Image: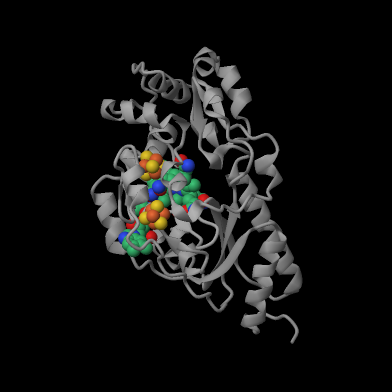
Amino acid sequence: MPLSAHNSVALAATLKQLALDAGFDLAGIARAGPTQYEEQYRAWIAAGKQGAMGYLAGKIDERLDVTRKFPWAKSLLCVALAYWQEGTDEPAEAQENRGRIARYAWGRDYHKVIPARLETVERALRSLLGDAPFEARIYSDTGPILERELAQRAGLGWVGKHTLLLHPRHGSWFLLGEMVLSLELPPDAPVTDHCGTCRRCIEACPTAAITPYSVDAVKCISYQTLENRGEIPAALHAPMAGANFLVGCDICQEVCPFNRHPLPTREGDFTASPMTSLGTSEVLAWTAADWDEATRGRAFRRTKFEMLQRNARILEGDAAPPPVNGSSSPDGS
Ligand code: B12
Ligand code: SF4
Ligand code: SF4
């Protein structure tokens, strides 16, 4: 049967194949519509767990239901791009006096990589559908949308107790993206929760930031190193020095049993020149120009010069960071 907007089963299969051809590792279709977890989301905001990420408390109605922003939205193509890479873990002795960079930030900024791949998919779909018009909007951490719940609905995995999207065979080392579509497409079957009685991520988290299916961002090292532009609460300095991350944090993923056999990334933009750690004294000796050079095109450019030096001081056990004012939205909302 020829491909047309009216043959939704064939169209969904073709669209997912286009996504895989564009380099994504997982692709699925979710129905557009309200979250199942409105109450939990609103309670999280009411408790102030977003910290200075004020954008999470804005546009809540839109975030909880994509059809509020795009009344034409019927379906979403949800994609995942693996970012784990082999052979770049440094031996313990080489890590001395070095602070780790979380894996998602080793290579080129995914906020640039994923939308570019999704634009390729959109162009291919428009060319296949000829003159049949449709609406499409692309996101990857760039707008008010609940990316993990949507990916779960699209059958890419389940949302683990650490709140990340986990694939039953390949684990959680994936970054997510979506294309909101006006096309009516049959959704994939959601994956059920496989966490069972496991509590490893909860027990390993150095700052006790995780309660099952919820992370208190204010306690999370990832938030403190990447998003907090002010002072880091003194109570977190010792656990942060123990965790030894200058940028982000991977501990809850490293201990997860579903990450034992990660899918290596095929993305050249992630493997071209991975930066896995930085010397703390080197960072403290940097000028703003050195920071600019080292972070160009990388996701951890969000960690401004003063923030990176503040983080390095905490890792070195010296906590007197000068505050840096203001906060901004990573997801552009
Ligand atoms: C804000 C944010 C953060 C904050 C807050 C993290 C958090 N857990 O919410 C901080 C800065 C701490 C952070 C850290 C990280 N982040 Co972040 N972050 C986001 C962002 C922009 C929004 C997430 C959000 O809305 N949080 C608010 C909370 C309340 O939302 P929620 O947990 O989804 O809320 C749901 C749950 O409460 C759920 N729920 C409630 N009860 C129950 C019960 C059950 C059984 C279930 C299933 C669900 C459930 O329902 C709610 C609505 O869906 C997303 C991009 C996006 N737009 O989605 C990326 C995103 C989640 N981050 C990502 C990444 C990679 C990270 C880090 C790994 C980076 C790092 N290495 O440092 C860490 C991981 C820390 C962690 N364990 O979460 C990826 C995750 C990819 C994946 N495999 O899941 C995303 C999706 C970006 C992307 N496009 O790839 N992040
Ligand atoms: S990223 Fe680190 S600090 Fe944040 S919840 Fe996971 S283990 Fe805890
Ligand atoms: S460590 Fe255990 S509880 Fe946490 S996400 Fe992985 S399987 Fe689920």
Q: Between residues 130 and 241, which one lies in front from this camera angle?
A: 241
Residue at the image position 62 percent from the left and 38 percent from the top: 107
Residue 21 in the image: state x and y as whole percent. 72, 62
Can residue 199 be seen here? The reply is yes
**Eyeballing the image, is 265 above or below 284?**
below
Can residue 331 be seen here? The reply is no
Quadrant in the picture for the N terminus: bottom right
Residue at the image position 36 percent from the left and 50 percent from the top: 200
> Viewed as shown, does residue 104 lie left or right of 56?
right
Which residue of the protein is positioned furthest toward the bottom in this rendering? Answer: 1
Residue at the image position 62 percent from the left and 30 percent from the top: 296
**Eyeballing the image, is 40 above or below 238?**
below
Task: Choose top left, top right, bottom left or bottom right for residue 118.
Answer: bottom right
Residue 112 in the image: state x and y as whole percent. 62, 45
Residue 142 in the image: state x and y as whole percent. 52, 49
Count of numbered badges drawn on the protein: 0
**Eyeballing the image, is 215 above or below 145?**
above
Residue 234 in the image: state x and y as whole percent. 27, 25
> Viewed as shown, does residue 56 lie left or right of 137?
left
Q: Between residues 112 and 201, which one lies in front from this camera angle?
A: 201
Task: Choose top left, top right, bottom left or bottom right for residue 125.
Answer: bottom right
**Eyeballing the image, is 135 above or below 278?**
below
Residue at the image position 56 percent from the left and 56 percent from the top: 177
